[in-house]
Image (spheres, helix red, strand yellow):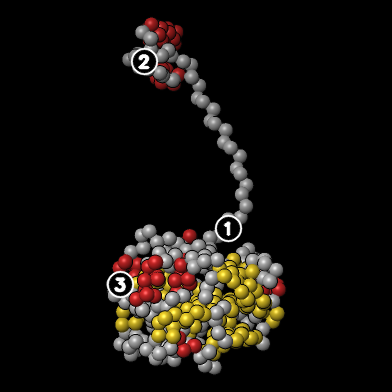
Amino acid sequence: MAATWENTAAMGQTEPDRRGKTANPRLILAVIGLTCGLLGSFGLTACTNSLPEKPAATAPAVETGPVVAESWPLTGLDRPDGGPRRPAVAVKIENTASARPQSGLESADIVFEEMVEGGLTRFNAIFHSQTPEEIGPVRSVRPMDTAIAAPFGAMLVYSGGVPQFEAKVKAAGLRGYNEDEALGASYRVNWRRMPHNLYLSIPKLFEKVGIEGVPEPDSAFDFARNGENPTVVDAGVPAGQILVNFPSARVRFDWNGSKWQRVDEGMAVAARSGAPLQADNVVVIKTTTIETTVRDAAGFPVPETVLEGGGQAYVATGGKVMDAEWYKDSEGSPLRLTDVAGAPIVLAPGQTWVELLAAGSFSYQ
């Protein structure tokens, strides 16, 4: 049995005798020597004169650079403490006078505006950094919604839809939920008439259907970081208004000194919560449509916006606008933005609205 010097000394001490004398130190050493010899003769570890070991030298501190805060992938805004891990949710939201004011659009990370039958528009809003309890009115799926939601791996929520469009969602590998499949996370309100009264709670959707195995989204765009200027701020031209004219919808964004305020039918738009609908970035994608074999109740053919390939685009940030290019390699590929020379465009952190202008005109002033 190994014993340190301190332990051996303790074992060899004798109690002071009753006359107040202590044991002879030479006797103590003799006893220690005899004990060590006996231990050695039996093959046991010999006694050692161990001194306290010197503490191991500590490695010098390594200087590191400043800690870079994690950001939300779809807004570029700071994500305190990493934020909760969850998938993105894409929600189809109506855009008509009967649907306004909508709920939840002010909390979306990205809002896509798409043209539907009759030249009207609807929204496909992508939620990740915020998860509202009230989003809507929720309406039906369209064929281009898979190409919008797929790059985010998003759970896609809609009221219902033509069977072939719903089948396309499943074929794309997305988790799609119509009103029944949402298991009560979609609910009807009594302060609006059908079909404008279906709403969604994202927290309840996560609770009802679960999110295990659904990944977090990857970054959608490049965002300015650490004092970097957005590309448009450095390279764009001043603009006070952006006008996006669909065949049956007139859209305007007014620069108010800090954000782009959305204007519909000549009026600044707010959400049902009272929060104004204001974007940090507005992206206009010039593309085309193809006709599907489906017609709506009024007999209009249902168009599908082409979201593969590339073409001309415009990007507005910080009260300025610049020419750009967009490209998207496949249905599941992200939408990428570059300047006309091919360099990536860096957006301002915050909410981005993407106008999928498949027919109509764009201008700014």
Circle 3 residues within 10 Å: few <14, some 14–19, many ≥20: some
The percent position of residue 244, horizontal first and vertical second, equals 58, 85
Mark 3 / mark 2, whichever is N-terminal = 2
Q: Quadrant of residue 284?
A: bottom right
The percent position of residue 59, horizontal first and vertical second, equals 58, 37
> Which residue bears the numbered disc 3?
181
Residues 112 and 80: in front is: 112
In the rendered view, would you say 17 is above or below 187? above
Q: Quadrant of residue 210?
A: bottom left
Which residue is drawn at the image coordinates 55% and 60% (left, top)?
Answer: 69
The percent position of residue 331, horizontal first and vertical second, equals 49, 68
Amino acid under label 1? Val
Number of numbered discs present? 3
Comparing labels 3 and 2, the label whose residue is closer to the camera: 3
Amino acid under label 3? Glu
> Which residue bears the numbered disc 2?
14
Circle 2 residues within 10 Å: few <14, some 14–19, many ≥20: few
Q: Can the viewer see residue 73?
A: no
> Which residue bears the numbered disc 1?
68
Comparing labels 3 and 1, the label whose residue is closer to the camera: 3
Q: Is residue 180 left or right of residue 157?
A: left
Report helix, strand or loop for mark 3. Answer: loop
CB under 8 Å between discs 1 and 2: no
In the rendered view, would you say 248 is above or below 7? below
Q: Is residue 185 left or right of residue 277?
A: left
Q: Calculate the distance from the C-alpha at mark 3 to the C-alpha at mark 2.
A: 84 Å
The percent position of residue 172, horizontal first and vertical second, equals 42, 66
Q: Calculate the distance from the C-alpha at mark 1 to the C-alpha at mark 2.
A: 64 Å
Mark 1 / mark 2, whichever is N-terminal = 2
